[in-house]
Image (cartoon, helix red, strand yellow):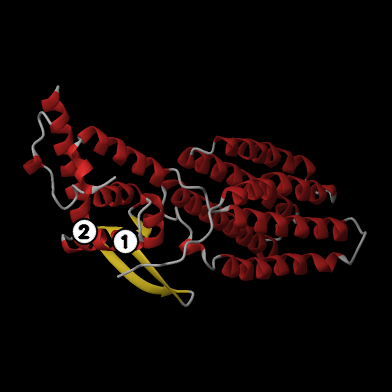
Amino acid sequence: MAGLKPDSLDDVIHGRIRLGVMAYLAQTGQASFAELAKALETTNGNLSVHLKKLDAAGYVEIDKRFVDAKPLTTAHLTAAGREAWRAYLDALGVLFRDQD
Amino acid sequence: MSEHDTNDPKADLAYVRAMTERAARAPLLGGRYLVFWGGLLTLAYGAHYLVRSGFAGAPGFIPFIWIAFGVIGAAGMAILSIGMKRKPGQSAVGNRVEREVWRGAGLGIFFFVAGVVAAVAFKSGSYLLFDLIAAVALALYGAAFLATAAASGEGWMRAPAWLSFVAAAIVPLLAGTAVLYLWLAGVVVLVGVLPGLRLLRAEPPALKDNEAA
């Protein structure tokens, strides 16, 4: 694709599910695992793999606890994640500018 | 769509936009609280009217009506909160604003009631002050509905907001009469129970945590 500079895009975010997670959490700040799986229309296993990648990069924090005697897993966007998301959107913007 | 499709920035942007809108436009989750408090208030105002108009009980019963209202309200909130953390959209801006403004409205009413009770108990304040509690409450409901409507995009909420403002203006005109409470019972159905039922109809079910890892 003309103007595409893969190196300028953060590989941790630049994957369909991870992109969706980051876009969703950038709006809400946090969401339960089940909510993310439903919103992204993906399987639990798939989401789990991608959340772990984002967690390892420090972009999200996974919180597991019991609420009303049942487990509840929640993903939070970290400050580093928000910064990385801004940088990713900036890089996308540059990409479009270069295409024009 | 697979990971490989992220080579198309336009598709990525469309996807980001779709996810952002999905996250922002989650259904409001406050319907159960509106129905509960609206229903409870309707019963309390109805009982207040019956006692004050002489149809039932004795005037000394009125404080007990409102003490029971507070106790049932507190217990009901604890019960209604069960399972709420599993509802999708908890952190959407509309739901965050809805929680904050209604909490603020509740606190505003509580402190005004405390001030009225103190004024009547220690400063020989007029009992008419009790009748004005509803005016303060309705004004706060109106502001809460307007803020929630703006944050959630649920424009229909402006109707109960303006109804609340108009009702707040009528309260002083009916203050000092028993019929005020019969009228308030009807108003609360319109600005509490009915909007709450509408929200409940659109409310998504709680999601089970099936996290795989």
Furthest residue toward top: A100
Q: Secondary structure at mark 1?
A: strand
Q: Position of residue B102 (x, y in %)?
A: 54, 52
Residue B86 vertical position relative to residue B178 in the rendered view, above or below: below
Q: Position of residue B164 (x, y in %)?
A: 65, 41
State the residue at coordinates (37%, 56%): A37
User: Is residue B137 something that shows in the picture?
Assistant: no
Q: Specify the label residue B18 is tagged with.
A: none
Q: Nearer the viewer, residue B133 or B41?
A: B41
Give the residue type at disc 2: Leu
| Label 2 Cα crowd, 10 Å radius (few <14 / some 14-19 / many 20+) | many
Q: Nearer the viewer, residue B123 or B22?
A: B22
Q: Secondary structure at mark 2?
A: helix
Q: In the rendered structure, which disc, 1 or 2, sits on the residue that comes first in sequence?
A: 2
Chain holding disc 1: A
Residue A84 vertical position relative to residue B107 in the rendered view, above or below: above
Q: CA distance from mark 1 to mark 2?
A: 10 Å
Give the residue type at disc 1: Ala
| Label 1 Cα crowd, 10 Å radius (few <14 / some 14-19 / many 20+) | many
Q: Specify the label residue A75 is tagged with.
A: 1
Chain holding disc 2: A
Q: Quadrant of residue B38?
A: bottom right
The residue wearing badge 2 is: A54
Q: Position of residue A76 (x, y in %)?
A: 30, 59
Residue B173 shown left or right of residue A4 in the figure: right
Q: Quadrant of residue B213?
A: bottom left
- Asked if the residues shown at circle 1 and circle 2 are in contact, with their CB atoms under 8 angstroms apart, the answer is yes
